[in-house]
Amino acid sequence: MPELAEVEFYRKVWDGGIKQKVRAVELHASKRIFRGMDTKALTQALTGSVLVSSATHGKQLLFRFSKNGWLGLHLGMSGRLRIGVPDEEAGRHDHLVLRQARQALIFSDPRQFGRVLFHQGVAPPKWWAALPPQILSEEFTLTRMTRFLSRHARAPLKAVLLTQRGFPGIGNWMADEVLWQAGIAPACLAGKLDAMQTKRLFRAARFVCRGAMRTVGIDFRDPPGGWLYHRRWRRGGICPRDGAALRHAEVGGRTTCWCPSCQKQGF
């Protein structure tokens, strides 16, 4: 599933269409990624409009068009954005195509767990404005994170980190990375952290997000060397920090990797 940095990369893919007019809109209106929306209104509003700007927020993307059009995209588990030639024939899983003179902006989603949203108005849509503070923003503070942890005190940290209302953009591999960097076991309950552990978790969350944005978010290359990421799914993988054998189990409903030697808290 695309996470914070992968989403940022895909945003920049479509940025190649900024300042260009959408000559035609093609979509598969019956697909579930368009559930609950007026696809005719989307088609009418975006046809003839110009892509003005783009933004990301966690796992969400927002593309602003002239004529007060706002296109929101959530990539789900298998969604991705790409650019094709102007007259490229849409594939089976290419559910939204915006055709411009120089290229086609294509949203593909084989498994259809993604979502397309549309709003027309001067101000940004409410569903965008209501999103929680991003982890690398000034609004994401230690106090705010601590309060969120306390509201989920009985849940394992792995599950809490995957909760988008508190940690927007964090997915499975990033959650494992944050906990490994912080030296905290994924099954540790959120309410069991002491003040020092909470500070380590806060710093690790921002550190991992920043590092991912500087690597994956730039050109989709792997995160920095020395991270757990490079060992987490290797058979017989060992911890980059102390060489202990890594463990795998389902924690918080997701397959999880950790080092039992340097992430002892909670076991």
Image (cartoon, rainbow, N blue to C red):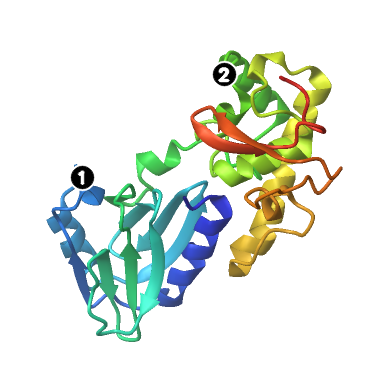
Question: Which percent across, then down, holds residue 151?
Answer: 57, 15
Compared with 237, 87 (above or below) is below
Q: In this rendering, does residue 71 appear at all? A: yes
Q: The residue under label 2 is which amino acid type?
A: Ala
The image quadrant of residue 44 is: bottom left
Residue occupying image coordinates x 13% and y 53%: 30
Residue occupying image coordinates x 47% and y 71%: 13
Residue occupying image coordinates x 71% and y 28%: 185
**Residue 196: mark:** none
Dot 1 alpha-carbon crowd within 10 angstroms: few under 14, some 14 to 19, many 20 or more: few
Compared with 164, 231 (above or below) is below
Q: Nearer the viewer, residue 118 or 225?
A: 225
Q: Of marks 1 and 2, which one's residue comes earlier in the chain?
A: 1
Question: Given contact means CB atoms under 8 Å apart, are the residues at marks 1 and 2 in contact?
Answer: no
Q: How many labels does the image show?
A: 2
Badge 1 element: loop
Q: Mark 1 points at which residue?
A: 35
Badge 2 element: loop
Q: Mark 2 points at which residue?
A: 155
Task: Estimate the spatial distance between the alpha carbons at disc 1 and disc 2, rounded to whole Å.
Answer: 31 Å
Check the image and name the residue furthest to the right: 242
Question: Which percent across, then down, holds residue 118?
Answer: 27, 51
Check the image and name the residue furthest to the front: 236
Q: Nearer the viewer, residue 143 or 201?
A: 201
Dot 2 alpha-carbon crowd within 10 angstroms: few under 14, some 14 to 19, many 20 or more: some
Question: Which percent across, then down, holds residue 175?
Answer: 62, 39
Image quarter in which the C terminus is found: top right
Residue occupying image coordinates x 53% and y 27%: 252
Q: The residue under label 1 is which amino acid type?
A: Arg
